[in-house]
Amino acid sequence: MISQKYKDMLQAKSVIREMSAWANQRGAEIGYENVFDYSLGNPSVPVPQAFTDKMIELLQTRDVMELHGYSQSQGIPSVRAKFAAYLNKTFGMNYTAEHIFMTTGAAGAVAHAVRAVTQPGDEVITFAPYFPEYHHYVNQTGAVLKVVPADTEQFQIHFGELEKAINSKTMAVLINTPNNPSGTVYSTATLQKLAALLEKKQKEYGHDIFIISDEPYREIVFDGVDAPYVSTFYQNTLSCYSFAKSLSIPGERLGYVAANPKCTDAELISVMCSQISRGIGHNCPPSIIQIAVSEVLGITSDLSVYETNMNLLYQELTALGFTCVKPGGTFYIFPKALEEDSIAFCQKALKYDLVLVPGDSFGCPGYFRMAYCIATEKVERSLAALRQFAKAEYGIPNG
């Protein structure tokens, strides 16, 4: 008999993936270049040439077993040391290799981090809007995800609602900054306030409360935006990172957990994660990718196109009368739909070959996400379809 648990999950498939599948099917009919696919957050800019060159060099010069054999379960020691040194130089931290655990992307990092600081029955708090997969990352551990309603004015943290949600069962707060889907970057003031509250609650409840900071968009921050490093504000922080977005290598699946050296049992987190891997199979990311990335640290893809695309969409959306918080980073924008039912809104948009993702699964009904990691030329062509959609369906005069 197959698992009823996972069989039931088939009834709640990823809306993002379903919209992406629709876009691909429609593309087969009319040409994908004519489908304005804003569904999937797949990096669209080329991999840095330095990374490609390094891969070629490694394949030509290094030992086959070094490149293609299993790494140690925590990751290659020299790679972990390089990552620690880079974080220290960049953010003024004091990591060593023992604080770094290599993972298969940020998803693997979050999956390990949650298990490292919770037990079944514990609660993990996150903030709407949030990445829908957090439900699976948390709930499948036996812990429970609690969602704090959104601050729709700025998409910073709604502290009034957080105060209501936090309790003695709270063991972790899962944040994502820069944020998917809103594009908001948590400010210094927000992180200071969060840190102060959690310090207070740790003392009140007599146990640690960790911040699990999901940071795959850390390098995609727009001009003039305050984008502080979370771990500098709060000792009990586990930083979860991926190189998918900064290097445009989502298929290579490389990330890490970095335990703040001042967090409780900091020296045990990485070795504990090795034991966690035994139960979830997220272990030993590809050795060649670990080595190659460690030798190009500080280099990114040309990420400037995302800010160009954001400005084009933000200007058009606001001109059409959409309510929209201007993103500070990522490659997402999260406007309010022109009707309360954002699912119906996104279905109507498909008639104009605009593939948008309703905000319901992100914990924000009435909003929708656009992933603008597509060619700028395509963004520009999509604006006419957006105007036509707004005018025909909602009578927007500027449409």
Image (cartoon, rainbow, N blue to C red):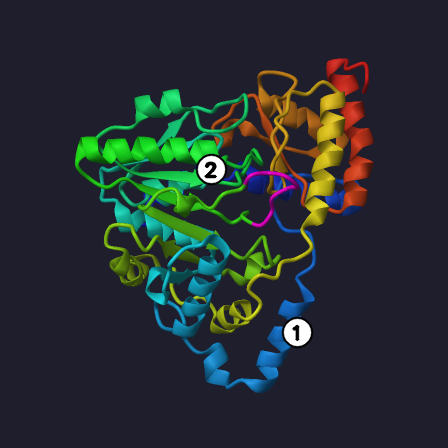
| Residue 41 in the image: above or below residue 193 | below
Residue picked out by circle 1: 53
| Residue 293 in the image: above or below residue 367 | below
Front-most of residues 276 and 75: 75
In the rendered structure, the answer to whether residue 67 lies left or right of residue 7 reads: right
Question: Which residue is drawn at the image coordinates 37% and 66% (left, top)?
Answer: 97
Residue 162 occupies quadrant = top left
| Residue 3 in the image: above or below residue 205 | below
The amino acid on which the numbered mark 2 sits, given as a three-letter code, is Pro
Is 225 contained in the magenta span? yes
* Total count of labels: 2
What secondary structure is the magenta-colored segment mainly? Answer: loop
Front-most of residues 155 and 70: 155
Q: Earlier in the sequence, mark 1 or mark 2?
A: 1
Q: Which stretch appears magenta? A: 219-226
**Contact, CB < 8 Å: mark 1 with mark 2?**
no
In the rendered structure, the answer to whether residue 253 lies left or right of residue 234 reads: right
Question: Which residue is drawn at the image coordinates 41% and 50% (left, top)?
Answer: 239
Q: Position of residue 390 (x, y in %)?
A: 75, 21
Question: Which residue is drawn at the image coordinates 27% and 47% (left, top)?
Answer: 117
From mark 1 to mark 2, how far is it between C-alphas? 36 Å
| Residue 240 in the image: above or below residue 190 | below
Q: Quadrant of the C terminus?
A: top right
Q: Position of residue 146 (x, y in %)?
A: 34, 31
Q: Position of residue 389 (x, y in %)?
A: 76, 24
Residue picked out by circle 2: 132
Is 363 contained in the magenta span? no
